[in-house]
Amino acid sequence: MPIYFRRAVLRMIVACALFAVAPSVTKAAATRQNQIGEDAYRIAYHVAMPNPKSHLFEVRVEVELNKVEEFIEFQMPRWSPGRYGVFEFAKNVQEVEASVPCWPQTKCAAPKKLNVTRLDTQTWRVVPGFARRFIFSYKVFGDDLSGTFSQLDERHANYNGASLFMYVVGHKQDPVKLTIEPPPSWKIINGYTTRADQREWQFANYDILIDTPTEIAPDLTIDEFKVDGKLYRVAVHSFGSEGGNRAALVRDVEKIVRAETAMWGAPDFDAYTFMFHFAPDALRGDGMEHLTSTQVIETCALADAGCLEEALGTAAHEFFHVWNVKRLRPVGLGPWDFTKPVVTRGLWIAEGFTTYYGHLMLRRAGLWDERRLLDSFAQTITNVETAPGSRLTSAEESSIIAPFIDRAGNEQLTNLLNTSISYYPKGEVLALALDLLIRGKTGGRASLDDVMRRAYEEFYVRSPKATYYLKGRGFTNEEFARVTSELVGTDMTYFFDRYARGTETPPYEEAFAQVGLRLVRRTAAGEPFSAGITTDLRERQGALIVGVGQNSAAERAGLRQGDVIVSIGKTKVTGLSWRSALNVYKVGDGAPMTVRRGRQTINATLKLDAPDRVEYVIEEMKDAPPQARDLRTAWLTKKG
């Protein structure tokens, strides 16, 4: 067949395909790509930022095929690992095109434009014709500093890979190359940087590429230390005064690293990078875990009171993720299908247990004393046990609905504040109870530390590699319960069935007694009334109601989500001050309030019931036996 005729036939086939199969292109593409085989494409990413004020990252993807293909598809992830809400990163993609350039070894007058068709919200199709090497390019708007999105401005560039890089459908497993072209004199740092002038990186696959957030700035600082032969870097980009606190930050981060590696043993990397951003103008604080790095965003200057402590608390949590979630991982966490929300039942272990250990490690590192730690646990218990959703949503179900509750924005009004509970605090109280029970049942011979180490060894270190992504495989909740039972020497399945899969109140009394402590419930001091109202604390023009408790005084008064409390009595209120204005009143009083509902102003009266705000405190048992005191000492200070 003459070549021109073959090209004409190919164009006809492609044109028919675009009209005939567009409604099911994703499924068709997946089937087609599965038939290609294991031959990898050569894929190279190039990122430039020639005009930082535009907030536009310029991305080129050079693809070299192993054979002529009818079409190639590119997809932008809908969400990002570690942040499970669906954010649709393709919303910020623009100016998508593809071409066959005049490569050095070819002769041509000008680059050849290729046909690019957008198939759905996240997918673009390129028709390469007979070209086996082409460039796919696009721009991404980014002006949001966080652990999920990306930001480019005249001060710096910071990107999280899932919000910036498309993948070649069916070829996420292929090795990729990355080249970054920064503005002149800007430095680059990420978890795989090995030298100051590095501009190129190689990654085993796309999933590792996007798990490597990168900071590019003219004025970031980098300090280093070593622990057990591993290199640690503390990169700091400050948008405010540091007040001489950077040395303390580096010193205390090292204490955290030593405490956590003492529990786990040697981490599975050669170098690790802490990337701190102290940005008072950031929209929100954040922390995000990665295989060889973490990003910590604080909405304060390092010189501000309390900012250093906040940063260290986030660092302790994120560094624990080096083992728990990034390597020891529940089924469903890697590799990922970015065309739909993730579903896993184990986030209460991955995130909740990490929250527990993040706090415990601050004590073991010597940054907190015992009372600070116990008060933190008591506050978490208060938050869980006073949340109406705690008895309606189990830890497992909370993990499953993560896309609904993990910083997911809702245009529609929901009842999630009354029906759901986050897997972070729910998992933390379960880890606390389980750890103390294990210590008591084994007389201190075992702990949750041992369970975590044994699970890490079984599922990550020794299990055969299940996918291209990492060593080992994901575990199920049933397997985690089995490891726990084997280590304790008694069947612990009941704990997982009743408190993780079920919604029963954890056995706090039994657990705390093992270490000579008790949990006490009492009426909250200071402001015992909330009337079932939850508000947006940021609101300054009145108090915006974001939740109304079921069977509460607010519900009986007819208040709704979206209402704005303008005043209580004669006192104008904000999202921060409304509670103090309400607590001027007493049980049985009717508290008059003015409420703005849309364009209407209405009057309501809250009739206050008995105090509805309770709190829990953890106290020492004065008559605790010596062995319980010894268990508490080992729990709080054990180094390995």
Image (spheres, rainbow, N blue to C red):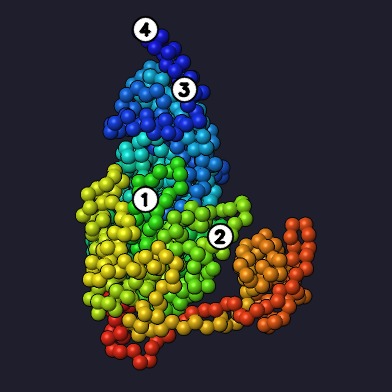
Q: Which mark is residue 567?
A: none
Q: Which mark is residue 2?
A: 4
* Mark toward the start of the polypeptide (1 vs 2): 1
How crowded is the residue under tag 4: few (<14 C-alpha within 10 Å), some, or many (20+)? few
- What residue is rendered at 62% in x and 52% in y? 412
Real-space Cα separation, disc 2 to disc 4, in angstroms: 64 Å
Real-space Cα separation, disc 2 to disc 3, in angstroms: 43 Å
- What residue is rendered at 51% in x and 54% in y? 404
Discs 2/4, front: 2
Q: Which quadrant of the rendered structure holds the C terminus?
A: bottom left
Residue situated furthest top in the rendering? 2
Give the SS element for disc 4.
Answer: loop
Circles 1 and 4: CB atoms closer than 8 Å: no
How crowded is the residue under tag 3: few (<14 C-alpha within 10 Å), some, or many (20+)? few
Q: Which residue is mark 2?
A: 416
Discs 1/4, front: 1
Looking at the rendered structure, the kind of residue marked 4 is Pro
Q: Is residue 375 above or below residue 335?
A: below
